[in-house]
Each structure stands twice: as C-alpha cells, then as structure tokens.
Image (cartoon, grey):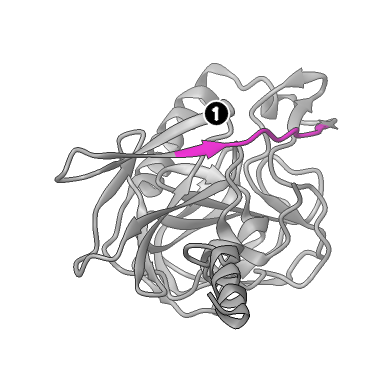
Amino acid sequence: MSRPLLMLFALILALPVQAEGFVSRLLNKPVPGGVAVVPLGEQAQAPRASYLGKPVLVVKEDNRWIAIVGIPLSAKPGAQSLRLEGSGRTLAFQVGAKHYKEQRITLKNTRQVNPLAEDLIRIDRELAEQNRAYDNFAARQPSNLLFDKPVDGPLSSPFGLRRFFNGEERNAHSGLDFAVPAGTPIKAPAAGKVTLVGNLFFNGNTVFVDHGQGLISMFCHLSKIDVKVGDEVPRGGVVGRVGSTGRATGPHMHWNVSLNGVRVDPAIFIGAFKP
C-alpha cells in the first residue's frame, strides 16, 4: 500500500464513528440532575422512547434521531436504560457522579419552614397541579434548545444545592436563581404555551411555559404575572416581573427546567453548566 493511502487509512481510523452535533455537545451532561443525549438511529419516522415510565424528548440531529433525557437528582451513578416504544428494546447510557454544595437560609416566616395543618392542605393541592403541568407531553417540537437567559444578570444560587432553612434540610434547589432587581422583565427562553399561573404557597406568583415534548420552564417569586393560561408566548416574550413572593428572602428570578417530569439544571440549556 502506498504511503498516501496508508496516511489516509490512518486518518479514517482516527475519526469518530459519528461526530457529535451541536445539540449533543450542548446538552449531553449525564449526571444526577443533568441531561443524557442518547442516539436512536436514522429511521424515517421519529422513534418513541421512555425513561422511568415517562416519554422523553426526541429530535433529529444531523440526519439521526436522538433522545434528550432528564436525569433525576436522586439517580445513582452507573448504568441507566431508555426504552424504545413498540420494539421493547432498551438502550443503555451511563450516569456519572456530581457533588452539589450546601446552602443555609434563615427565614423570618417560620410557616415557610414548618407549615401549619391548613397550609399543608394547600401545599398538597398546589403540588398536584404543578405535577400535572410538569407531566404534560405536548406533541410540538421545541423552537430552540439553546435557550436565552430569562433575565440579564449574574447567577446567585446554582441548581442542586442541598438547602437548609433555619437549620432544617428541605428539598434541593431545583432551579437557577438570578440576582436582579424587583420589576425586571422575565422573558421566555424559547417559544411555548402557558399552562399554569397562580400564587403558590412556596413559589409565590408562578408561571409555567410548555416548550413541547415534556420540556417545560417554570418561573416563580414574581411580583407580577403578565400572561394567562393558554397564551402562546414567543421566544423573548415577557411572562412577568421579578419579585420576592412566596418563600424568598429578597427579589430574585428563580427559573427551573423540567424534562420528562424531572427537574434538571437550566445552566445546561444556556451553555453555563459547570461539572
């Protein structure tokens, strides 16, 4: 074999079998609270897949289908599996480890730490409403997967913090906080439909925007809500204003992102993820 052919052969062997596309490079952060991108193949029709019994987002990238899977914070490092509907086949993917720091917060309103009996009734009702919104799986494709930041400002509290309120551990921080003044407009990071609005016990004034196929944004602690259920919001459309309603110590914008009913790190979708 000639020298040029040998060099060409060596170059081909050095190339990856299939290079990752932009979406895969952006979103594939397979850790607890992260996102796994799982290749599904090049068939003509979009395959359907599920993880932990819930359908997952499937999009086409570079002529192949990929599943974009939200991984719960409770997931253990190691092998996980995605189920391909209709065929019964499973596809394995690996979840790595990630350490999340602690955050300690002092609240003057002790009912926001240890709610009264009547508060618990309200909390349970609101939790059921939110879970229904998170579990919705609309057929629409998300308009974009590289999200815009909902506000221009520095990040204050990252996703996944183990939170202690008045010394008592509560649920981990399920979103990103941005340190911005009260009244700052909050903009939709991608187009979507408003599926839930209201004043909730912990979240205060809250807006859910469904971007499609189980990809959902939630904004809370708002001072003002500028949309209603059923509204179609364009990318960059204002959904409300920053505030400090609900369980908050001051004005800030809390944003969480849900995939297949699982809260994941929004920093992944804005290119700000830190391993």
Q: Residue placed farthest to the left in the image?
A: 86
Q: Is residue 94 magenta?
A: yes
Q: Left or right? Give the position of 236 relative to 275.
A: left
- Total numbered labels: 1
**Camera-nearest residue between 2 and 147:** 2
Task: Give the amino acid type for the residue marked by disc 1 in the picture.
Answer: Gly
Q: Picture coordinates of residue 167 (x, y %)?
A: 82, 19
Which residue is drawn at the image coordinates 77% and 26% (left, top)? 165
Is residue 78 depicted above or below 68 in this figure? above
Per the image, the residue denoted by label 1 is 78
Query: Is residue 148 found left or right of 48 in the rendered image?
Result: right
Residue 32: image location, x then y, percent: 60, 36
Q: Is residue 252 visible?
A: yes
Which residue is depicted at the point 57% across and 79% down? Answer: 2
> How many residues crowd mark 1 within 10 Å: few (<14), some (14–19), many (20+)?
few
> In the displayed structure, would residue 76 be above or below residue 263?
above
What's drawn in magenta, residue-wise? 93-102
Q: Position of residue 49 (x, y in %)?
A: 29, 48
